[in-house]
Amino acid sequence: MMQTPPISTDRFSGLPSRDLLLIAVCSDKGDPDPICSWARELVRLHRAREEFPDTATVCDCRRGEAIRQITELACAAEPSATVARSIGLLIDRIAAAAERAMRYLAAFGAGSEQMHAAWTTLAELELEYSDLISGRFDPRERAPS
């Protein structure tokens, strides 16, 4: 019988683990980690943009600010990695995928193809994040020591 691995709360060089980030974007559970807080804010902005299309410009400006904040925090946590610069954009993509996955789960149910596709996309992005923060994403992207 296959077992679900335990949730990892380990951090890589001060960055939240993939599991902590997933919890942050899929719940309103408070987390003192500032990157997780900004990730939750990105989910709220994607939701607001979807529910109120007339607020898209405001939401996009605020998203840009959140992405910059995440990138600054990631660079401070891992200053030697050039890949830290792309973490803000990746977390924005994760937040958009999480918002879509939760919306599809509520609208179409757990057995729907739309829901399955949305959660698969979210899982793929979470793996990309995990690879990025662990340095396995692309070694050529790492800054020299």
Image: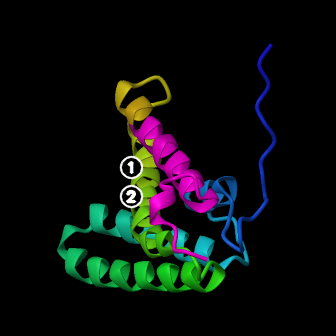
Residue 96 is tagged as 2
Point 36% across, 78% down: residue: 63
Say whether residue 43 is left or right of residue 2: left
Determine if residue 27 is in view: no
Q: Please report the residue visible at 71 percent of the width from the left and 65 percent of the height from the top.
A: 12
Q: Is residue 119 magenta?
A: yes
Q: Position of residue 79 (x, y in %)?
A: 59, 83
In space, the residues marked 1 and 2 are separated at their CA atoms by 6 Å
Give the class, few, some or many, for how many residues have Cα within 10 Å of label 1's Cα (few <14, many ≥20): many
**In the rendered structure, does residue 144 fall within the stretch colored magenta?**
yes
Overall secondary structure of the magenta section: helix
11 relative to 70 in the view: left or right: right
Quarter of the image that includes the N terminus: top right
Q: Nearer the viewer, residue 35 or 105?
A: 35
Front in this rendered view, residue 59 or 81: 81
- In the picture of the structure, the residue carrying the numbered disc 1 is 100
Query: Mark 1: which amino acid?
Result: Arg
Which residues, given as a range, are shown in magenta?
118-145
Colour theme: rainbow
Could you say where residue 42 lies in the image, as x and y percent from the top left? 44, 70
Q: Residue at x 37, y 25 (%)?
A: 113
